[in-house]
Amino acid sequence: MNHLTLRHRLLMLTLLPSTLIAIALVAYFTFTGIRTLEGELRAKGMATVRYLAPISEYGIIAGQFESLHGLAHATVQESGVKAAVVVNQKGRTIAVSGRVSLSAEELRRTLSEPAPVGETDQWVAFGAPVKRSINETDTLFEGGRNEKAMAPEVIGHVFVEFDKTELAGKQRQLLQRGLVIVLFGLLLLAALAIAMADNLARPVMRLVKAIDGMSSGRLDVRVPATSSGELGILESGFNEMATHIEEVHLSMQSRIEEATAQLAFQARHDALTGLLNRREFEHRLEKALAGVQAGGDEFVVLFIDLDRFKQVNDNCGYLAGDELLRQMALLFQGRLRDEDTLARLGGDEFSIMLASCSGPRANQVAEDICGLAAAYRFIWQDKVFAIGASIGIATVNRKIRNINEILAAGDAACHRAKESGRNRVCEHAVVHNPERRQETSNWASRIANALAEDRLLIEALPLRALQHANGHHVVELTARLNEPGQPPVTLAALTDAAERYDLAPAIDQRLIDTAIAAQIRAKNHQKTLLCLIPISRASVGNRETIDFITHRLSSRNPAGHPLCFVFSEDTLTQLTSQAMEFSRQMRSLGCQIGLEDFGGGLSSFTHLRSISPSYVKLSRSLTRDLGGNRASTALLRAVQEITADQNIHTIADGIDDLNTLEQLRGLGIDFAEGKAVAPSEPFEVWLEGAVIRSA
Amino acid sequence: MLQLSRFALAFLLCLALPAWGGSIAVVISEAGGAYSEFSSTLEEALAGTNWAVSTTAQAEALAHGSGHTDLVVTVGSEALRKTLSKGESTPVIATLLPRQSYEKIVAEFRRHPGRHTAVYLDQPAARQAAFLSHLLPAQKKVGMLLSSETKAAASHYRLAFGNAGVKLDSEEVDAEAALLPALNALLGRVNVLIAIPDSTIYRRNNIKAILITAFRYQRPVIGYSPSFVNAGALAALHTTPAQIARQTADMILSHGTSLPAPTGPNQFAIAINSNVAESLNLSVPDEATLRRAMLANKEAR
């Protein structure tokens, strides 16, 4: 019962009882009909003999056998009558018609009333006595004998036989009709029941199917809400529910898609600048490389490293750094074609893929961008920063096997640009040497090894007094990392790397030691030597360095001209209090302070008061193109006037030609260094040659 | 006229035998029906005379020696038989019985001599002939079934019918089985069948057969009682119990215990079955007309 469907249950519920009732009814009526037929036959038989008997009376009395024969014949003509027999008082047949089945014995029996006299399956026989009819006569004339009590005399019998085959036929017909009625009724009932069951079950089945559909994920499935009553409520309720679920699902889907798109965007883009990020850039680079390898045009990748980004970041905080990066991104973007790809690889590194571009044109673009970056001034609150860009160019051609080679080449080129003094463009042919990057990333051990193995080459940059030479030797110390098979690394690049690994103070200390030793030696030879020692930012804010200097000066006790510690204006801007403290300490030790890169920012002059330096190294932007630029000359002259007023000596560095030298001299600049003065040479060599052996 | 003569006779008798009377015992065969009608009519007729009905008893309940009576009037055949069987000497007047029965019973009790007379039911042959000629004047051949009991009377009838110009034919029937063949034979020869009271021929269980057979032959049957007419006879000449009672009363008053010879009914009634007449396509006069005609004819003679 439990495994039946709703439709089957309904069908059973309607069909079963009605079928039983129909069968019972038809069976009852058929049976009754059969009984009635039999009863009718019996009644007809009895009636027939009852009528036949009195009619036969006179024939028997009068012996008119012909008329009796006629009577019997007429009786047999009746439907269903098989035979008719008239017998006389002695049981002798006197008239007969039809085929008689009753035996002679049975014909001889005496009856008092009409009655059935015999029956088989084929026939049934009825008999009746023929009685002499009695007339009421005048009793007065009766001969005195009392004849009243006498029963009517039986003068013969009539027998009639009925054929039952006709009855059986009728009964069979009745039965067949009953069966046909049952069958027809059941068919009708079945059709009705099926229609009813379908009517009820179909909406339910639709609902079931719809629910199946929903559970298998088809949320757009609906049922036609055509039913009435509870089913209708169910259907519309289901539809509402489905609509609701679908809406929720869709909105969730769209939210998921939004989130996915956002994630995908974020995965490909840099959150800060909105440019492509490193991963996406590498991906596009791979595609572009594949295009080149498949025969496409060569292209160029520019690797841009912002100069002095760190200063902005350290001086004004990350917000400023972020803003700078955004502005630079916009700046670069504005210069590029649509087909070029600009990405931020991380930190202050950008990269540009110049599609279908190589050789001089790429160089032109790189120079262009470099100029842009150099000319750009980043203003944050009251501070102005000059930004530069070191750009490495890597040309991608068919020989390149993978993007790591491009990246390494670009990186190396960029590095070279940085090492060769920033804000310039370097091209680097791609070499199949992926270890390069590995090594650069291994600065810590390189620097440590260099210090330990004394591979740090200390060099001297001699300064020339432009105004009035007093025979004093003024020299600036610098250093260069010499490694076998590697290009030498400048102090600026070295310091950048060393600061990252906290090794800058060690380099500084080496310079300091060298300077102190040189001063002592010069003093021993009665020479006056002034050493300018560049001090890294880390050392300025480092208590240990101050302690080291204090200890070295007190233990070695150098006399004569003191040391001059030079740090950059950036350092002062970022670590103002530490720098002031450092200056105070150094001055108490009898040392002097010099400011590097002076005049690059507007804040330069405030520093003069707070630090009171003895020397300032002028920013190269002031001294670069003195040639015909009156503004620059005026600016330089103003700086010179201010410093002179404060009794601060000015130094112009990187002076490579005599013309400039003469101009500087004319402007009143105190010292100059560069190739026009003297090339840099190993400090020991210079000390021996220029100081010890000088006259 | 008859009445007047009767009164004159009674008056003469009264003169001859002055002032005698007596008690009468009435014995009836059965209670009710014709017998009661008879006894009540008799009592009425005797009222105011010296004769009075002292007892009225059924034949079955007749007791021996139940008081003295001067005269016994039996009503019906059974009453006569019972009364005679007692063997008393009281004079008996037997009434309401066919002549054949009276003679048969009297013959049975011949050993007990007694005085008795009868007023029987059988109509006189002359009256029958007159009735027939008035009823069916065209029919001149009539038939009659006779048994050994009625054979003797046949000559009377033949004579009477002859006088009326009608030929009487007859068949004798001695056995039941011979009835219908005899009837068939007779009906083939005659136009009308006249039945006379005969207990061996006309019985309750064969009257129908006789009537049907006659009807087959399209012959009218003239019976002797109203029942016969009801059963299908065309007409009957009969006398009612009341008529017999009055006749009996007259007899008692005029003769007293000196009994006269047995006699037939001197009054009559007529019964006609008009349905049968229609069925047989006969036009018959109605009863009153017939009776008047018969009486007129009698007087005229």
Image (cartoon, rainbow, N blue to C red):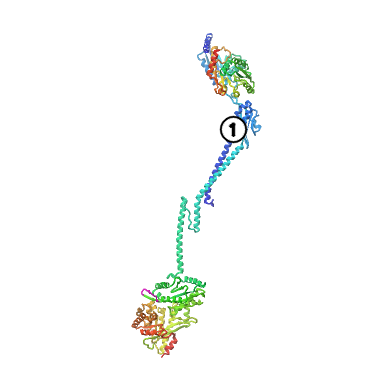
Please, what secondary structure does the residue beneath circle 1 have?
helix
Q: Is residue A524 left or right of residue A186?
A: left
Q: Which residue range is magenta in the image?
A: A375-382
Q: Report which quarter residue A21 is drawn in.
A: top right
B70 in relation to A369, above or below: above
A379 is within the stretch colored magenta: yes
Q: Position of residue A84 (x, y in %)?
A: 62, 32
Residue furthest bottom as drawn? A695
Q: Tell me if I can see residue B243 in this picture.
A: yes
Image coordinates of residue A57 in percent, x first then y, are 61, 27
Q: Quadrant of residue B230?
A: top right
Quarter placement of the C terminus of chain A? bottom left
Q: Position of residue A426 (x, y in %)?
A: 46, 78
At label 1, which amino acid type do we have?
Met
Q: Is residue A443 magenta?
A: no
Which residue is denoted by mark 1 in the rendering?
A46
